[in-house]
Structure formats: C-alpha cells, structure tokens
Amino acid sequence: MRSAAAPREARRGDVADPVDRQLALRAATAGLSVAVGSLLVLLLLLWVETKWTPLLELDDGARDGLHRFALAHQGFTSVMEAVSAVAGGLGWQVVSVVLVVWLLWRRRVRAAVFVLVANAGSSLLNTALKDVVHRHRPVVDHPFIHPPGQSFPSGHAQAAATGFTVLLFVLWPHLRPGVQRRAAVAVAVLLTLLIGFSRVALAAHFVSDVVAGYAVGITWTLVLAAAFHVWRPPAARRDTASRSRSVSPQGD
C-alpha cells in the first residue's frame, strides 16, 4: 500500500525536474562558452608567439588601412579618440563604483562583490597576460596616441567585454523579457565592438589583440559568474532558475 507522502514527493519531483534540467542546460552552455573562449585565447597566443603569417597579414593590413583612413578623416579620428578615452580604465571604474553603490543600496551584497571581483580581477589578469606575452604595440609613422605598456591582449577590449557582460548579468532581472532584453544585448554588443574598433583605428592595438581581449573578458566573467552561482545556497539557486532569471549572483 502506497503512503500518502509518496504522491506528494512525486509531485515535488515533477516540479523540480524541469528546474534541474534548466540548471544543467545553463551550466552546459556556460561550460561550452568558457571552453570556446579559452581555446580562442590559446590559439591567438600561439599564433602571435609563432608569428603565424596569415595573422600577421591581417593585423598589419588592418593597422595600415585604418591608419591611412584616419589620417585622411579628422572627424573619424576625433570620434575614435573620444570613444577610446571614455572607455578607458577610469570610465569603467566610475561605472563600477556607481553600480556597486546601487547594489549595496538594494542590499544585494553578493552581486556587489561580484562586480568588484569581476572588474578588478579582469584588470589584473590583463596585466599578467601582457607581461607574459610581451608583444609590442603597432608602429606607425604618425601615431595619434602613445599608450603605455604592452599590446596583447587589449585592455580596452577586455574591460568592455567584462564590463558589459557584468552589466547584463546584474541588470537582466530588472529588464522586461522581449524588447528591453534584446535592446540591452544589442547595445552592449555594439558598444563593445566600437570600443575595440577604436583601438585598432588609432593604431593602439592589432586586431588579434582586440579579439583576444574580448575572449579573455567574456571567459573570465562567465567563470566568475558560475562560481558565484555555485556559492549561493541550493534553495536560492533553484528559486532563481524557476523564475527564469539570470545565472549571475542576484543578491542575498
């Protein structure tokens, strides 16, 4: 004879299974993204170190072509300089501070910690990679800017990829499904691409530097988001998944 508790347990299991599958799907997607990003960074690093001819031709061709265009179009150069300046380290520091203050005001301490660790860790990781690779910056006859440090990977591109991914993770639950979320993703992608493009246009980086910066920034943020998600209590993770919210840290 079956106990009265059995049907209730079965019903609870029926509700939990879709949530478990959703969590597993998100974990698999994040894992695949991390694997692809890591592979891309390693390939770029290998090609840069071995001076792979097709990559050098792409880098040099983009550098020379965009630099000639920039020299002939002062308006274009001014826009690229403005984008590059706003998207620098100071710009992202201001954004991070404002976002952390807002999160703390809303008592989302874990999310605030996530923002701080993501942006600070990305900066340290970028510095470490530049020291290891030690790639010199592009050389042109009439440079527009004279950035310090090494070239690979692009700090601006990595900061943009990290920063906008963090913003999407944190703000996603507050955006309405549909138009708002699609618009947020589109704006984040377009601005990230524009920032990276500005660095190549100003001959501050090669194309491969920018692509590597994107890959490192996104991969780092996904790994950190997964770690913060696992850090949350199981009940909170299941409750978040059941409401179809982001895998990022949503608060305490």
Image: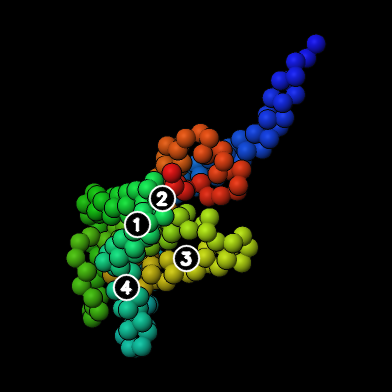
Quick one: 59 or 150, which is closer to the camera? Answer: 150
Q: Return the disc, 3 or 4, that comes first in the chain's sequence.
A: 4
Judged by depth in the image, the label closer to the viewer, 2 or 1, is: 2
Judged by depth in the image, the label closer to the viewer, 1 or 3, is: 1
* In the rendered image, the vertical position of residue 11 relative to residue 185, given as above or below: above
Q: Which residue is mark 3?
A: 188
Query: Would you call the spot at circle 2 few (<14 residues within 10 Å), some (14-19), or many (20 or more)?
Result: some
Judged by depth in the image, the label closer to the viewer, 1 or 4, is: 1
Q: Which residue is mark 2?
A: 108
Q: In this rendering, would 37 be left or right of 121? A: right
Secondary structure of the residue carrying tag 1 is: helix
Spatial CA distance of label 2 from label 1 is 9 Å
Q: Return the disc, 2 or 1, that comes first in the chain's sequence.
A: 1
CB within 8 Å, label 3 to label 4: no
Secondary structure of the residue carrying tag 2 is: loop
Instruction: Point out the image quarter for the N terminus.
Output: top right
Secondary structure of the residue carrying tag 3 is: helix
Spatial CA distance of label 1 from label 4 is 19 Å
Query: On residue 86, which mark appears?
Result: 4
Type of residue at label 2?
Arg
* In the rendered image, the vertical position of residue 117 relative to residue 84, given as above or below: above
User: Could you say where residue 233 lies in the image, as x and y percent from the top left?
Assistant: 47, 35
User: Could you say where residue 119 lies in the image, as x and y percent from the top left?
Assistant: 33, 54
Q: Residue furthest right?
A: 1
Type of residue at label 1?
Val
CB within 8 Å, label 4 to label 2: no
Type of residue at label 3?
Ala
User: Could you say where residue 200 lies in the image, as x and y percent from the top left?
Assistant: 35, 71
Q: Return the disc, 4 or 2, that comes first in the chain's sequence.
A: 4
Quick one: 249 or 106, which is closer to the camera? Answer: 106
